[in-house]
Image (tube, helix red, strand yellow):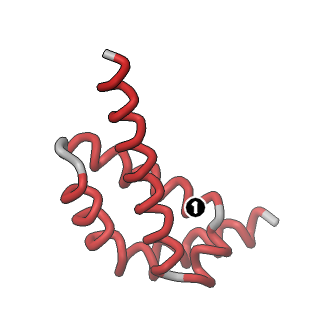
Amino acid sequence: MAARLNTTTDALAGTVLETEMPKLRHYIAAELKYAATAEDLGQELWIRAARNADKAVDAGGPYLWRIAKSLVADYLRGEARRLTAA
């Protein structure tokens, strides 16, 4: 099991993320105001993709884009809640 996880995670890092991550980071940064927040969400994207490495490798870019869009939407919803609560 551990060997399979490492192999799949290596495949994820070596192929899908390598080609998609620059575009994903650009998208996240364009949607948010702060570079540090965009970097944090980029890291969260990698963590979520690594957790589901089999799915990320099999589905490729569209799966990663879905994660990125969900992270941005969740972040923006949280910001809107914080602004209305203040």
Residue drawn at x 62%, y 69% is: 53
Residue 73 position within the rendered picture, expressed as x and y whole percent measured from the top left: 41, 52
Residue drawn at x 19%, y 59% is: 30
Q: Is residue 63 above or below residue 42?
A: below
Which is more toward the observer, 1 or 73?
73
Residue 4 position within the rendered picture, expressed as x and y whole percent measured from the top left: 74, 72
Which is more toward the observer, 27 or 57?
27
Mark 1: amino acid: Ala
Q: Is residue 68 above or below residue 63?
A: above
Residue 19 position within the rendered picture, expressed as x and y whole percent measured from the top left: 35, 81
- Disc tally is 1
Residue drawn at x 74%, y 69% is: 3
Residue 16 position within the rendered picture, expressed as x and y whole percent measured from the top left: 46, 79
Residue at mark 1: 50
Q: Is residue 50 above or below residue 60?
A: above
Where disc 1 sits, the SS reads: helix
Residue drawn at x 76%, y 62% is: 2
Q: Residue furthest top?
A: 86
Tell me if 3 is positioned left or right of 31 in this view.
Answer: right
Instruction: Quarter of the image for the N terminus: give it.
Output: bottom right
Q: Residues within 10 Å of mark 1 (few under 14, many from 20)?
A: many
Q: Residue furthest right?
A: 1
Instruction: Quarter of the image for the C terminus: give it.
Output: top left
